[in-house]
């Protein structure tokens, strides 16, 4: 009798519900990684800096645009004399009778007022088939010869004018290095967004690796 009572009590005893372990892990999804036209996009923090994403490339482009002309002009100044891009001025001497009276209003410059270098250039121009001579020295009548003047030399009248000054371009000596630095900083600014994304993705992968 007691055995039957024990069996009955066992059947009436409630069963404890099965408790399954509860985890905080989010459900797995099959969502593919984000991609763009260059391939998979590295994971980045949700609060990606607008300064690094937009302002840095814009400032980089501005610096490159400013640095290029500075570097070009500064580089030209550095090499202009060595490659013969500047030098001594030249004058032309044309017989006045070739102009048929068109020089009536042109100023007359006495030959005695010419400097030694100007006189040597005049003689060279008179003897040259190109009617040009190089002023290798002081150009004392620069303003007058820029406008053109009549010079009487050895009984002949010539219309003498500066054909080319060939003067060297003069700018601040630091223009070239400033331009190069601006270009380099600009390139860094343009490359900041992809570098930032790569670094953020690397940090996130390292963080996930430590959590595992």
Image: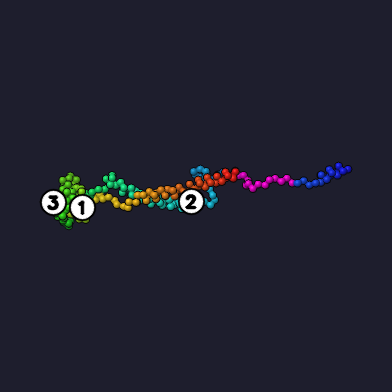
Q: Which residue is mark 3?
A: 153
Q: Considering only order in the chain, which callout, 3 or 1, is on the residue closer to the N terminus?
A: 1
Give the residue drawn at x 59%, y 45%.
211
Q: Position of residue 155 (x, y in %)?
A: 11, 51
Q: Considering only order in the chain, which callout, 2 or 3, is on the residue closer to the N terminus?
A: 2
Q: Are marks 2 and 1 in contact (CB under 8 Å)?
A: no
Frontmost of labels 2 and 1 is: 1
Left or right? Give the position of 17 relative to 109: right
Element class at badge 3: strand
Frontmost of labels 1 and 3 is: 1
Q: Nearer the viewer, residue 100 or 37?
A: 37
Q: Which residue is mark 2?
A: 53
Q: Considering only order in the chain, which callout, 1 or 2, is on the residue closer to the N terminus?
A: 2
Q: Can you say which quadrant of the picture contains the C terminus? A: top right
Element class at badge 2: helix
Q: Position of residue 65 (x, y in %)?
A: 39, 51
Per the model, the C-alpha gap separating discs 1 and 3 is 18 Å
Per the model, the C-alpha gap separating discs 2 and 1 is 58 Å
Q: Callout 1: few (<14), some (14-19), or many (20+) C-alpha neighbours within 10 Å?
A: some
Numbered label tally: 3
Q: Position of residue 176 (x, y in %)?
A: 35, 49
Q: Nearer the viewer, residue 137 or 147?
A: 137
Q: Which residue is mark 1?
A: 139
Q: Callout 2: few (<14), some (14-19), or many (20+) C-alpha neighbours within 10 Å?
A: some
* Stretch of the chain drawn in magenta: 17-31
Per the model, the C-alpha gap separating discs 3 and 2 is 73 Å
Element class at badge 1: loop
The answer to whether residue 93 is visible is no
Give the residue drawn at x 53%, y 48%.
44
Extreme residue toward the top, this view: 3
Prevailing SS of the magenta stretch: loop
């Amino acid at each position: 009798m007691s055995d039957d009572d024990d069996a009955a009590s066992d059947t009436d005893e409630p069963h404890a519900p099965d408790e399954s372990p509860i985890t905080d892990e989010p459900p797995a999804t099959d969502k593919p990684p984000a991609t763009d036209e260059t391939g998979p996009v590295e994971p980045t923090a949700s609060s990606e800096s607008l300064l690094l994403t937009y302002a840095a490339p814009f400032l980089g482009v501005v610096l490159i645009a400013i640095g290029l002309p500075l570097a070009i002009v500064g580089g030209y100044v550095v090499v202009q004399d060595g490659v013969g891009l500047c030098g001594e001025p030249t004058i032309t001497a044309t017989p006045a009778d070739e102009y048929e009276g068109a020089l009536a209003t042109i100023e007359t410059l006495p030959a005695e007022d010419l400097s030694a270098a100007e006189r040597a250039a005049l003689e060279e121009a008179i003897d040259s088939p190109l009617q040009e001579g190089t002023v290798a020295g002081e150009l004392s009548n620069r303003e007058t010869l820029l406008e053109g003047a009549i010079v009487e030399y050895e009984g002949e009248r010539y219309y003498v004018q500066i054909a080319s000054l060939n003067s060297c371009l003069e700018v601040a000596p630091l223009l070239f290095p400033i331009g190069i630095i601006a270009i380099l900083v600009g390139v860094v600014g343009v490359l900041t967004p992809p570098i930032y994304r790569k670094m953020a993705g690397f940090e996130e992968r390292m963080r996930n690796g430590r959590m595992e």
